Amino acid sequence: MVPLLIISAILVTLIVVCVGKDGSLRASYDQELTESIMSHFNEHEAIKLSSLTSWSWDRLEVFDEGASAVQIEEAVGADVLGSKYLFDRTLLVFLQDGRPVHAATTYIAFSFGPGESRVFTDDVTVTPVETPDHTGWIIRLL
C-alpha cells in the first residue's frame, strides 16, 4: 500500500509540473524537439516541423525572449508561461483548433526578417539558410 501511495504522489507531482495546478498547459523545455531540429540543421537539411512532433497541431505561435505572459496569453488564449516574462529561451506554442496542445521552450533562436509573421500552419518547414556573407547558417521557419 505504501509503495503505491508513493508512486501516486510522484505521478501527481509530475502532472502538476507539466500541466499546472489549475489544469492549464505549461511550457517546459523540450529536449527531444530541440535535438531533432538541431540534428537536421547541422546537416543543412530542411524538414517539416510536423514530422518532428508526436502531437497533432494546425497552428504554431513563436515567441522570443522578453515576451510577456500577457502577450502570449492574448495570442494563444491561455497562460502557458507560468511567469511574467519569457527569459533565455524561445517559446513554441502548438495549437489544434485554436487551443494550445503543447508549449515547448528551446534555446534555438529562429531568425525572422523585419515584419515577418511568427504564426505558422502545420506545413511550416525548419530550414537552414546560409547567411548572406557566407560566414554561417541561421535557422528559419518557412
Image (cartoon, grey):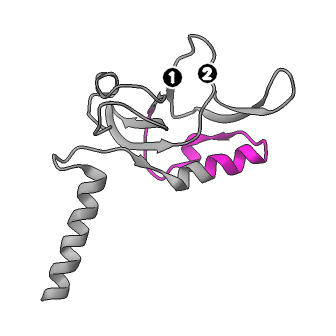
In the image, the segment drawn in magenta is: 36-59
Q: Which mark is on residue 118?
A: 1
Identity of the residue drawn at 86% across and 22% down: 133
**In the image, residue 42 lies at what x, y percent?**
75, 47
Mark 2 element type: loop
Is the residue 115 above or below the residue 16 in the image? Answer: above
Q: Quadrant of the C terminus?
A: top right
Of pointers 2 and 1, the one earlier in the residue sequence:
2
Residue under the point 44% across and 44% down: 104
Q: Quarter holding the N terminus? A: bottom left
Mark 1 lies on a secondary structure that is: loop
Tell me, yes or no, whether the two marked residues, 2 and 1, touch with CB atoms within 8 Å. yes
Q: Which mark is residue 142?
A: none
Residue 64 is left or right of residue 68, and the answer is right
Q: Label 2 to label 1, Cα distance in Å?
A: 8 Å
Q: Residue furthest right?
A: 134
Left or right: 134 in relation to 8 = right
From the viewer's perspective, tell me whether residue 12 is left or right of residue 123: left
The residue at the point 77 percent across, 33 percent down is 137
Q: Position of residue 12 (x, y in %)?
A: 21, 65
Q: Residue at x 43, y 35 (%)?
A: 87
Among the 4 quarters of the image, the one containing residue 80: top left
Magenta stretch contains residue 40 = yes
Instruction: Choose between 55 and 109: the one closer to the eye.
Output: 109
Q: Position of residue 120 (x, y in %)?
A: 51, 27
Q: Residues within 10 Å of mark 2 (few under 14, many from 20)?
A: some
Residue marked by disc 2: 112
Q: Position of residue 75 (x, y in %)?
A: 34, 23
Magenta stretch holds residue 89: no
Res 84 quadrant in image = top left
Amino acid residing under circle 1: Arg
Compared with 114, 16 (above or below) is: below
